[in-house]
Image: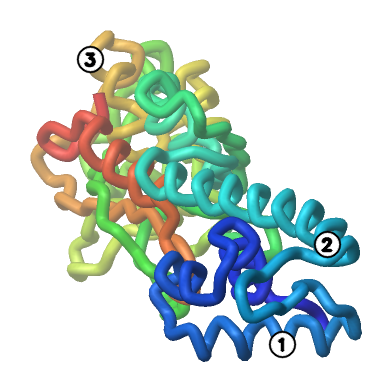
Amino acid sequence: MKSTLDEMKALIAVADTGSIRGASEMLSITPAAVSRTISRLEAKLDTTLLNRTTRKLSVTSEGGLYLKRVRKVLEEVELAEGQLRRQKDTPSGFLRINAATPFAIHGLAPCISRYQSLYPDVQIELTTDEENIDLVGKHTDIAIRIGQLKDSSLRAVFIGSSRIRIVASPDYLKEFGAPSGIDELSNHRLLGFSRPEILKNWPLKDENDKIFRAMSDLQADNGEVLRHLALSGAGIACLSDFMTFSDRQNGRLVELFQESSLKIEQPIHAIYYKNSATSLRISSFIAFIKANLNVENNEFM
């Protein structure tokens, strides 16, 4: 059987105080408990560690060799425990974050450096995926997901929402004109998501009160690709405000159907596994992102 830390501490206390009673006072246990602990340790090691006389206790030569090593062991344990306590007080360590490419570019990248200036002991790895990922399989601490959540094994923190709008570039509209109604969209080049299917629904209703489903001439699985296609004049797209706000403000994209478009907002959550203890670096990053995304009128600025 292997020695325990309590047994090592008992031996050190006896050696430092010179008596069972002194060790018991140092460790806040009874003298009998100290004596049993030392006897148990000697039995495990099959070695006499202490010379016992009626007057005094002294360490044997074997006990001295053992004592020298266990002092180093306990010093390392105390250092490790102290480091963990400091980590609980201050965010530190490696933080892996996953998000869809557009949100990583427009939502996370602008403010991550501010987080690291506040918490310089946190190292961040930011990865991108256009579909939901397995957090454990991808070794990910936090994932940012846009849209409705389905996985009940995850903890989710709502950090904002972003409205979707139909947009096109001034160059496209100059060449092809702006559709005046939903029925005219069939005469235009539509840019759309190849997946998931729900992103093919645009915030418009036809005369039968059904949500318009875009039949796109050009598809991509990445919203940032669609944004650049729209900016280049390739067609009309339906994109989230966090991607297009500055483009619309600067006139690079123009919102269509302003009066008739439905106000549909996509919820944005930071997620992590329920069965994992929340480290300070995870909770601090989520709190920081929630406070610093600068959401005004459901637009990321």
Q: Residues within 10 Å of mark 2 (few under 14, many from 20)?
A: some
**First reached walking from the N terminus: tag 2 or tag 3:** 2
Number of residue marks: 3
Q: Are marks 2 and 1 in contact (CB under 8 Å)?
A: no
| Residue tagged 2 | 66
260 up-or-down from 121: above or below: below
Q: Quadrant of residue 38?
A: bottom right
Q: Nearer the viewer, residue 282 or 213?
A: 282
Mark identifier at residue 39: 1
Q: Nearer the viewer, residue 120 or 204?
A: 120
**First reached walking from the N terminus: tag 2 or tag 1:** 1
| Label 2, label 3: how far apart the Cα atoms are | 73 Å
Pick the quarter of the image with the N terminus: bottom right
Residue lying at 11% horizontally and 36% vertically, measured from the top left: 297
Judged from the image, the secondary structure of the residue bearing numbered disc 1 is helix
Which percent across, then down, holds residue 4?
A: 69, 76
| Residue tagged 3 | 249
| Front: mark 2 or 3 | 2
| Label 1, label 3: how far apart the Cα atoms are | 79 Å
